[in-house]
Amino acid sequence: MNDHVIHAMAGAGGGVLAMTATYPLVFLSTRAAVKTQNENKSVYEAVLEILEREGILGLYSGLSSSLLGIAVTNGVYYYFYERSKGIFLTGGKKGLSTLESVITGLIAGSATTIISNPLWVVQTSQAVHTMDSKTRIEKLGFLQTVQHILAKFGMKGFFRGIGPALVLVANPVIQYSVFEQLKNFLTARRKLQRKGNLTDWDFFVLGAISKLVATSVTYPYIVVKARLQAGATKYRSSMNALATILREEGLGGLYKGMGSKLLQSVLTAAILFAFQRRIFLMTKAALTLRDSSLVGLRRTL
């Protein structure tokens, strides 16, 4: 098994762990982004409201599709990212330049967005299904949501929000570019100070900082994407959605749910980078041990 596949598996595994730990924040930010009313509720107040109306499981509506989505997203992204990165890192080169990081991120991000968008449409639909109901209603499962989208919108319904989603390829591009440059800087500094390699804690902090920068810059398009994926029909296009939100809700409308989203994104990225690296090293070590054992067995035979 080559390193590209191991990176993809590690990315998928790390993503599932990170999403499971932070999903209630994903749920809250999705609902806040989709709401068109100007409400100034804190994260705490939003949690209490959902607990009262939907119970503790209400905070996990859409978790199954999110776990599938994040596994596919991270697995595909890491595969294409590491494969593209390997093209640049030839001739003993140790790190990517800023331009190379951007190009690598664009390739990986575009492929990932096209492949995973249907899963995120399902997740968003599940998260907002009970949002406007005053009483408890039955939540839709993954397959029920798929059937609902097909019946209402047809196959094209699974690609709602693909425009802003492709624009949001800039998010991981910014994230991984910032991460690579910070990692290169810190690695060079550690070597200069003779303090050894980067630790899991270093990767955790670098992942958090890089995601904080990326999400802060791209958040308005996250709001637009969430509304389109939730099935909003009042917007003709992404640009029309931006203009309408600005006109009807003001600048604050483009940043609804940003608090919980920033917290979730930073925690998810930090956990992902730390666990992805650890899972990669453990898998690599296990495969190396297995290969060594097979070689030894063949020799004895």
Image (tube, rainbow, N blue to C red):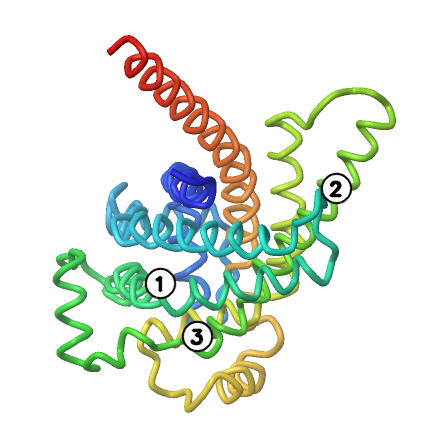
Give the residue drawn at x 51%, y 53%: 83
N-terminal-most mark, 2 or 1: 1
Q: The disc labelled 1 sits on which kind of residue?
A: Ser
**Cβ atoms at labels 3 and 2 below 8 Å apart:** no
Q: In the image, is residue 254 above or below residue 72?
A: below
Q: CA distance from mark 3 to mark 2?
A: 42 Å
The N terminus - image quarter? top left
Give the residue drawn at x 70%, y 25%: 197
Local secondary structure at mark 1:
helix
Residue ranking furthest to the top: 300
| Residue with the mark numbered 1 | 116
| Residue with the mark numbered 2 | 184
Numbered circle sitting on residue 36: 3
Name the side, left or right, on which 270 lies relative to 61: right
N-terminal-most mark, 3 or 2: 3
**Residue 21 visible at all:** no
Q: The disc labelled 3 sits on which kind of residue?
A: Thr
Q: Report x, y in % for residue 177.
A: 67, 55
Local secondary structure at mark 3:
loop
Q: CA distance from mark 2 to mark 1?
A: 30 Å
Q: Quadrant of residue 282?
A: top left
